[in-house]
Image: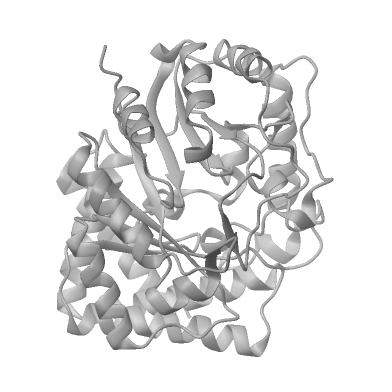
């Protein structure tokens, strides 16, 4: 039976974390090295069954560790649970070990596949070497070509992590990188920033250079790839503009992260960053949905009433700072989020002045609004909302 892979919407998310085992040695690795590798799958299956009983439908993501090292175990886990409630399957790999068993797994369970490939050959090889110190860009590029040639499901999304300690690529290097992605028939590129409490002046300068670089690319070049800067408000997060301050959302409120140690956490960040390896916000012996929802709602409610954030015009852009990053503290601003929010607004303001970019953004925002919260709205209704958003951004001081 062909499993469905529907648009995500707002359904609960199960994140499966397979431990810290990996075949890359990334300079900025944010995985928790103390997590044991997944060994006994039955415990994971039992845990997933309990969660699945509580909801009518789910999204299912495999994001932690390197899934190509656990193909047989992933198959056993998915074969042991009720998949009828899972409406979309997603898997992220570093792409270094693409073999027939992984291709078959992705096709059998209808996975949407993403691959990590950093921003150009130089930056990628600088930060993402294997355990022998070898460069990996060319190997991963060829593996994606091989996968897309031999698989029914295609790799169409690239995840890129930008470490602000590095200077961004040159314009020529970015053009070459985008051309490489076009050769791979990639449709989406998401550039994310490392989670930090603050950036120093050198890092801020590099982030600003990257925003300017993407702007210049949009201004002077044409591509069918949807390039998304991974701030909290970007082309793919239309829904965030419509959240009220007292109803601010957080994925932790609707996600369950099942780790290789048999525990359930609130989100990936609470276990994947070594700085927070001992901060297990939610850990259950008996899983009760209302317990998780109430705890998360209370944390969000407390946070949104924090005077530092509540009256800030950037609130709906940065969503007030992650409670995991802030160590459950509500009494100060998370400067890194504020900085990224300001740069995002500045980027939008400049972009909306260009007719070429304007049309491109309209297309992306409308398409993605139909994929997310506003699938019940007509295209015309979405466009009206988007025009209001653009005017709101232009008027921000």
Residue plotted at (48% across, 78% down)? 343
Residue 246 picture location, percent across and down: 61, 46
Residue 328 picture location, percent across and down: 81, 51
Which residue is nearer to you in this view: 341 or 210? 210
Q: Quadrant of residue 38?
A: top right
Q: Quadrant of residue 228?
A: bottom left
Residue plotted at (84% across, 45% down)? 278
Residue plotted at (63% across, 63% down)? 195
Residue 124 picture location, percent across and down: 45, 71
Q: Quadrant of residue 2?
A: top left
Q: Is residue 396 visible?
A: no
Q: Is residue 140 left or right of residue 271?
A: left
Residue 105 picture location, percent across and down: 37, 28
Looking at the image, residue 31 lies above or below residue 4: below
Which image quarter holds the N terminus? top left
Which residue is nearer to you in this view: 134 or 249? 134
Looking at the image, residue 82 lies above or below residue 148: above
Looking at the image, residue 29 lies above or below residue 95: below
Q: Is residue 85 visible?
A: yes
Q: Is residue 372 left or right of residue 176?
A: right
> How many numbered discs sit on the rendered protein?
0
Q: Is residue 233 left or right of residue 140?
A: right
Looking at the image, residue 339 lies above or below residue 45: below
Which residue is nearer to you in this view: 362 or 91? 91
Colour mode? one colour
Which residue is nearer to you in this view: 391 or 104? 104
Q: As drawn, which residue projects farthest toward the front?
A: 132
């Amino acid at each position: 039976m062909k499993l469905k892979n529907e648009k995500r919407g707002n359904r609960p998310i199960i994140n499966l974390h397979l431990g810290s085992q990996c075949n890359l040695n990334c300079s900025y690795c944010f995985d928790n090295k103390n997590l044991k590798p997944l060994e006994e799958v039955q415990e994971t299956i039992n845990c997933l069954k309990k969660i699945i009983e509580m909801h009518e439908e789910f999204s299912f993501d495999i994001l932690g560790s390197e899934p190509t090292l656990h193909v047989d175990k992933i198959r056993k886990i998915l074969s042991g649970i009720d998949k009828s409630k899972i409406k979309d399957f997603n898997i992220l790999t570093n792409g270094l070990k693409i073999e027939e068993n992984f291709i078959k797994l992705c096709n059998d369970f209808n996975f949407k596949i993403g691959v990590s490939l950093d921003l150009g050959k130089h930056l990628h090889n600088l930060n993402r070497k294997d355990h022998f110190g070898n460069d990996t860009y060319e190997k991963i590029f060829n593996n994606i070509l091989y996968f897309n040639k031999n698989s029914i499901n295609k790799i169409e999304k690239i995840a890129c992590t930008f470490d602000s300690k590095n200077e961004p690529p040159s314009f020529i290097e970015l053009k070459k990188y985008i051309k490489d992605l076009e050769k791979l028939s990639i449709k989406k590129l998401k550039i994310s920033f490392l989670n930090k409490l603050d950036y120093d002046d050198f890092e801020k300068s590099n982030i600003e250079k990257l925003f300017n670089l993407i702007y210049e690319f949009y201004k002077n070049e044409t591509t069918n790839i949807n390039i998304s800067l991974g701030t909290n408000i970007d082309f793919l997060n239309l829904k965030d503009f419509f959240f009220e301050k007292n109803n601010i959302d957080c994925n932790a409120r609707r996600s369950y992260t099942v780790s290789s140690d048999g525990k359930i956490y609130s989100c990936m960040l609470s276990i994947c960053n070594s700085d927070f390896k001992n901060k297990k916000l939610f850990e259950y012996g008996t899983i009760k949905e209302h317990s998780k929802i109430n705890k998360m709602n209370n944390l969000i409610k407390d946070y949104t009433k924090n005077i530092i954030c509540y009256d800030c015009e950037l609130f709906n852009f940065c969503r007030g700072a992650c409670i995991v990053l802030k160590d459950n503290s509500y009494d100060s601003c998370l400067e890194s989020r504020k900085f990224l929010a300001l740069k995002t607004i500045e980027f939008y303001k400049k972009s909306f002045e260009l007719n070429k970019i304007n049309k491109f953004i309209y297309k992306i925002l409308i398409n993605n609004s139909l994929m997310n919260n506003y699938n019940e709205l007509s295209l015309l209704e979405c466009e009206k909302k988007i025009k209001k958003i653009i005017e709101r951004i232009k008027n921000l001081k």
